[in-house]
Image (tube, helix red, strand yellow):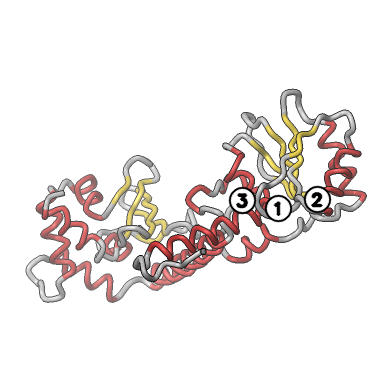
Amino acid sequence: MEPSDHLLQRFEAMIDLPAFLSSRGYQLSTQQPSEDHIAMTKPADGAVLLLQRDQVRGGWTYSDVRSPADRGSVAQYLERKEGLDRRQCLELLIACADERRRDMPEAVRYRAHRREKPEDLRLAETSYHAATERRRSAEKLLERLGVASRNFDEWRFGRVRGDSDVYRLLSEPSHGVWTSRYRPSDRKLVLVERPIDAIAYEQKHGNQEACYIATGSAPSESTKRRLAHVLADVRGGMEVVVGYGTDRRGQVLEAQVRSLAPMVQMTPHRPSLGNRWAEGTQMEARHQRSRERDLGKGPDQQRSFR
């Protein structure tokens, strides 16, 4: 990477992209409200850009609704949308970041918009940042539970926007049963106790080819009737996996489910670590964190297991 590229990345991260676009005629869009981004539109040509914070490099990124492949940093916006070369981008961004620079009107205008940001845009940013913090907190909680958030299949298991969504995954199904979404390419139906067990199973064995039903620890009679109908309608070639725990409760659940559909062949698959799939992933996560802490110590400080 050239020295100028490092400089460009440094100054990109300092730019308030919502204010920058505001100084160039963009306004907050009311057509696409979302916690995932801030949408800004340019009335002159109808362009709509979706803005997000770059959690890795810092700063903001954009994506063009009309051309989803057109996405990137503020410098890439300037290159693609306004025809600046990289040297011109760097000069403009440096001027924008330096309060003493009065020689570049575009930079002076940007700083004015940053100081006196429209109230609706300021509120949208506040809401977006709060939502981002809620998601980050939920991701950290999932990580502590042994679920790698980078591999979490939101389409399959639902969005996790905050801690309350994580607690929902940890809880007994609130309406008798909980189901994941189904893909036509799925080859397994896996029965587990709680949604978090389904997520843990997917992480270990799902390979994006399994859909899930969580029945809770004590399914009611109405829940059992629903399960019986579902199992009777399982399409040919679909493997039914009974993924309950290794303890007495898991054995009882497995026996109950088998009695609901005696003609359906079911494959037992029990966790090798912990009583339930979620317990196994939590234990593995704790062990990994412990190893990482030990590796961060000097040889004389590392924990002895003798």
Extreme residue in the front direction: 306
Extreme residue in the left direction: 103
Q: Viewer-nearest of labels 3 and 1?
A: 1
Residue at point 74%, 47% (across, down): 192
Q: Viewer-nearest of labels 3 and 2?
A: 2
Cα separation between marks 2 and 1 = 9 Å
In the picture, measured across the screen, residue 214 lies left or right of residue 293, that is right
Q: Find residue 69 and report its horizontal and vertical position in percent.
A: 35, 40
Tag 3: residue type? Gly
* Circle 1 residue: 276
- As drawn, the label of residue 20 is none
Label 3 with label 2: CB-CB less than 8 Å: no
* Category of crowding for the residue at label 2, using alpha-carbon neighbours closer than 10 angstroms: few (below 14), some (14–19), many (at least 20): many
- Tell which circle, 3 or 1, labels the residue nearer the N-terminal end: 3
In the picture, measured across the screen, residue 200 lies left or right of residue 13, that is right
In the picture, measured across the screen, residue 19 lies left or right of residue 123, that is left
Tag 2: residue type? Gly
- Tell which circle, 2 or 1, labels the residue nearer the N-terminal end: 2
Cα separation between marks 3 and 1 = 21 Å
SS class of the residue under badge 2? helix
Tag 1: residue type? Arg
Q: Camera-side residue: 252 or 86?
A: 252
SS class of the residue under badge 3? loop
Label 2 with label 1: CB-CB less than 8 Å: yes
Above or below, 10 relative to 112: above
Q: Camera-side residue: 87 or 217?
A: 217
Q: Find residue 204 and report its horizontal and vertical position in percent.
A: 59, 44
* Circle 3 residue: 158
Q: Camera-side residue: 88 or 260?
A: 260
* Circle 2 residue: 250
